[in-house]
Amino acid sequence: MEEEAAVNTLQDNCQVCCLDKNKDAANLAKYKCPSCGTRTCSLICVKTHKEQTGCDGKRQKIQFVPMTQYTEETFLNDYTFLEQVHRASSAATVQLQRWKDEQKSWFHVQKKNKVLERKAKQSNISVCFLPRVFTKAKLNQSVYSFKNGCIFWSLRLIFPHLKLAWQVTRVDENEPLKEVLQNIFQPKPSLSRNRKLSQLLRTYSQYKVEQMQVYLVSEKRRDLDHKTFERCDMTFSLKQILQGKIVVEFPTVAVLLPFEDLESIHRSH
């Protein structure tokens, strides 16, 4: 019995203090290393143990445990580990599917843009595309319709007087610009997508479209902040207006009221 008591006392003692020759007696252990099971009595001994042995103090989640030592705590640790594996696996599956969807979307956009670029080139229009990280590239919905045999452009409209920029989609390249604007200022019942814009443009609705000034805003692919402005004939379609021009993603036009000048465009930005 005395021998068993002595063994238990040794097991309860700090194993770091036992190795320290400068100490007369070891303190009682309070902590147990989750990684190797070393018993320590204080934070100082914990740090000393890690420095001397290189132990990281982290529990070995896949370490073999004999059935004789398998406890309820061990079972809960195993269950927690399996839950973590399941969550990591589920997250990886979602991430993989998202990556596949992005790749599929990217290839679809690339294919669509190549067709658009080729068809625009036939009309002497050069279309440049930005990397997909650019907002303008994400907003571009311009597409060539094989069914209609024409390009439907996304068109960005700038209204300097209201300091407003608005994008409309599916603008037929063969439709005169005058009609495009009329459908915005006075939308037909079928064009419900333009109603909200027309409400914002009540000031513009006081004037006839013929009285307004429309400028094509051109920008360089390498310097999107450098813009040039060219007066448009509103009886022309986008197909005619854009001939011989370079379009970055989709065209932009500025609509000025009769009393405005080009400086108003710069002031609106």
Image (tube, rainbow, N blue to C red):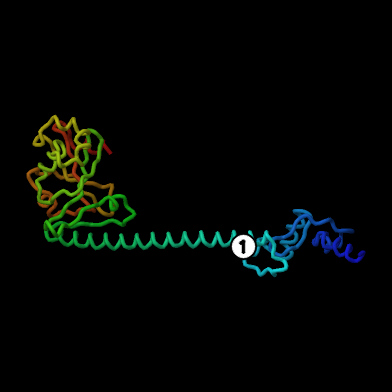
**Residue sitting at x 30%, y 60%:** 105
Q: Is residue 102 left or right of residue 228?
A: right
Image spot of residue 36 (x, y percent): 71, 65
**Residue sitting at x 74%, y 64%:** 52
Answer few, some or many: residues within 10 Å of disc 1's Cα (few below 14, many 20 plus, some between 14 and 19): some
Three-letter residue code for mark 1: Asp
Q: Is residue 235 left or right of residue 94?
A: left
Task: Please tell me in which quadrant of the rendered image residue 11 appears.
Answer: bottom right
Farthest residue toward the right? 2
Q: Quadrant of the N terminus?
A: bottom right
- Position of residue 197 relative to residue 129, above or below, is above
Describe the element under mark 1 as helix, strand or loop.
Answer: helix
- Residue 54 visible? The answer is no
Q: Quadrant of the C terminus?
A: top left
- Position of residue 173 relative to residue 79, above or below, is above
Reading the image, the residue beneath label 1 is 78
Q: Is residue 132 left or right of residue 157?
A: right
Image spot of residue 116 (x, y percent): 19, 59
- Position of residue 86 relative to residue 223, above or below, is below
Task: Please tell me in which quadrant of the rendered image residue 14 appears.
Answer: bottom right
- Residue 169 visible? The answer is yes
**Residue sitting at x 69%, y 62%:** 71
Image spot of residue 224 (x, y percent): 28, 49
Q: Nearer the viewer, residue 258 or 175?
A: 175
- Position of residue 254 relative to residue 19, above or below, is above
